[in-house]
Image (cartoon, grey):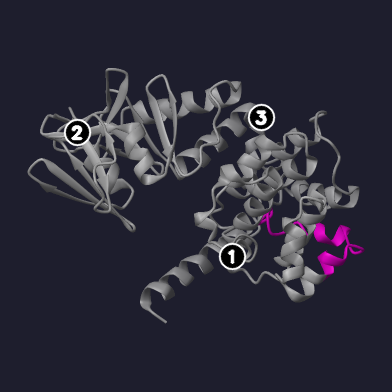
Amino acid sequence: MSNAVKIRKLIQSTLLLLLCIVFVSQQSIVYADSPITSTAIYQAYPDVKMVTESKNNGLTEKVANFLSSKDSPLDERAAVINALYSDQSWEERNYTDTYANQVYGMTFESLDIGSLRADEVFVLGYMTVLDHYITPDLDWLSQARKDIPDSMTVALVYTMALSQQDMMCSWNYIEQILSDKNLHMDIRQDALDIIVKYMELYKGSPCQNKGKESILTDSIVNDVTRSAVVLSIGHPDVLVKGTKRTIDYTDTKITPYITEGKTMVPLRFISSTFGAQVNYDQDKVTIQYRNQKIVFNANKSTISMNGMKDLMNTTIEQKNDRTFVPLRVIMEVFKKNVYYDQGLIIIADTIILDSQNKQDKQVTDKIKLKLLSSSKDTKQ
């Protein structure tokens, strides 16, 4: 075992130990450990054959087929997934990739969330959260929550995952779900009782002093910024996966700008942020990204890929000795999604925000405030 792996396992073990410690406040309020892994809802479905199959035999072909079928009830699929991870011995898994290969013939990372049914997104979202429950990725579950807004099953699973990120607010989150009259009771009462009983352990936590809307908004802000790159027109600061930086530490004039209706962004910064190699040769800029070789020709204002002839004409500008390209073009190259609202730019694999949604508007306002607030520790 390499030193890096040993260190990683040591860190994980330490985190898990901290999670399992029982915290007692001055009022002797007892808190728990892990909402997403400690709620055994599968126990409410002993009569469902695939629940037993999943618990006893793991992710078999039968289980995968049941999970992927649009005819399988959502709550039973949730119970099957819950049973699949029920023997969890405090370690991360990779069932999501295995399932994606079984059902779609590709890795989870290669899947296009926009091409899948909402119920498929829910299944994959629940699995990926359980795979990496210490630092859960809520992107897919967030999308499922938006696409199936009236499902109690989806709302509860999303809430448990959300609580995983902010455990002290667990009871606040579940209270919001229980009081939502728009939700359809598509989960067994026994399963709901299992979840509620666990969440009750967080009653009386310090989080209850905060407003419910503020709690949820803050959680979504953290969820979005954790996996995104956030920029703003005319500003040198950026957020890269939640960490504040400067686009170009040597020149604060390097900022996104708008010209002739196009949003222009610095090519080197965007490319390096997504792990691409950038090389300059006179008027040509070559980007090596995964298996793609993209060449920007400033003289011709064209882009070519993998040695092919020029694929498109585009605007390529030199400003303050830096190369700028249209945001839309570079995002097509990197296959990323963009949210844009009044100068705020959020780039991520999955965008779960809607500019017409009141709560999402509050989220983006907080993200913008977080980005533009003064910071003494802003770094390159």
**Does the magenta portion include 146?**
no
**Does the magenta portion include 40?**
yes
* Distance in Å between CA atoms under marks 2 and 1: 40 Å
**What residue do we see at 85% from left, 43% from top?**
186
Above or below, 7 relative to 43 = below
Secondary structure beneath disc 2? loop
**On the picture, is 76 further left or further right than 134?**
right
Residue 147 locus on image (x, y percent):
68, 36
Numbered range of the magenta stretch: 32-52
Secondary structure beneath disc 1? helix
Identify the image quadrant of the C terminus. top left
Kindly report which numbered mark, 3 or 2, lies closer to the viewer in this rendering: 2
Task: Check whether the beta carbons of the residues at disc 1 and disc 3 lie within 8 A of each other.
Answer: no
**On the picture, is 122 further left or further right than 243?**
right
Task: Check whether the beta carbons of the residues at disc 3 and disc 2 lie within 8 A of each other.
Answer: no
Residue furthest to the front: 309
Q: Which residue is mark 2?
A: 301
Q: In the picture, residue 80 is in which quadrant?
A: bottom right
Residue furthest to the left: 282
Amino acid at pointer 1: Asn
Residue 341 locus on image (x, y percent):
44, 22
If you read the primary sequence from the N terminus, does the residue marked by circle 3 or circle 2 appear first?
A: 3
Kindly tell me whether residue 380 is visible in this rendering.
Answer: no
Q: Give the label on residue 212, or none.
A: 3
Q: Which residue is mark 1?
A: 101
